[in-house]
Image: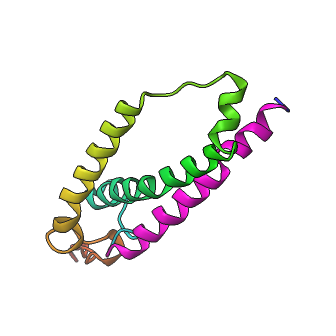
Amino acid sequence: MAAVIPIALASDTLSIALMEAIDNGVMLLLPGAMDAGLGSLLFWGALSFALAVAFVFAVPLNRWLIKRGKGHAVVHETGIHGGPSPQMVGTILAVAFVFGSAVLPSEAFGGGEEPAHQAEPHAAVTRSG
């Protein structure tokens, strides 16, 4: 296990940090995305869109690192590498981007439900006897 931790940190730290920064930035910029709950279509659409955008920025960083023998090149040197094919990754990225792009205009800028904390509380009806 001691040998795996440095390899994991060397291979993914910069890529993940960049993806998280872009993902969080996009989520902050999308109206209502930070207030949307897990049951909201806005949350999932915004997250899909943000991760697709972040992926586009992470790929050039990963290529740059690999050319210099860093990043995922370190993992490849171990001979232990798996994961989905590039075609599968591209398909997932395209689906996430299309889903997010289709959901966001309607949810973020118009017809979506109000976030739970902004909804009008329903008054309890009580009868006095």
In this view, the residue in front, 119 or 21, is: 21
Question: Which residue corresponds to the image point at 42% horizontal and 27% vertical from the top-left?
Answer: 85
Q: Is residue 18 magenta?
A: yes
Residue 57 image point, x, y percent? 46, 58
Q: Is residue 90 magenta?
A: no
Question: Which residue corresponds to the image point at 61% horizontal and 58% vertical from the top-left?
Answer: 17
Residue 18 image point, x, y percent? 56, 60
By secondary structure, the bulk of the magenta-drawn segment is best described as helix
Residue 116 image point, x, y percent? 33, 69
Quarter occupied by residue 105? bottom left
In this view, 6 is above or below 113: above
Question: Which residue corresponds to the image point at 73% horizontal and 45% vertical from the top-left?
Answer: 9
- In the rendered structure, the answer to whether residue 60 lies left or right of residue 78 reads left
Residue sitting at the far right? 2
* Residue 112 seen in render: no
Scheme by which the image is coloured: rainbow
- Image quarter in which the C terminus is found: bottom left
Bounds of the magenta segment: 3-31
- Image quarter in which the N terminus is found: top right
- In the rendered structure, the answer to whether residue 43 lies left or right of residue 70 reads left
Question: Which residue corresponds to the image point at 27% horizontal and 56% vertical from the top-left?
Answer: 100
* Residue 71 seen in render: yes
Residue 44 image point, x, y percent? 33, 54
- In the rendered structure, the answer to whether residue 101 lies left or right of residue 89 reads left
In this view, the residue in front, 117 or 95, is: 95
In this view, 125 is above or below 59: below
Quarter occupied by residue 45? bottom left
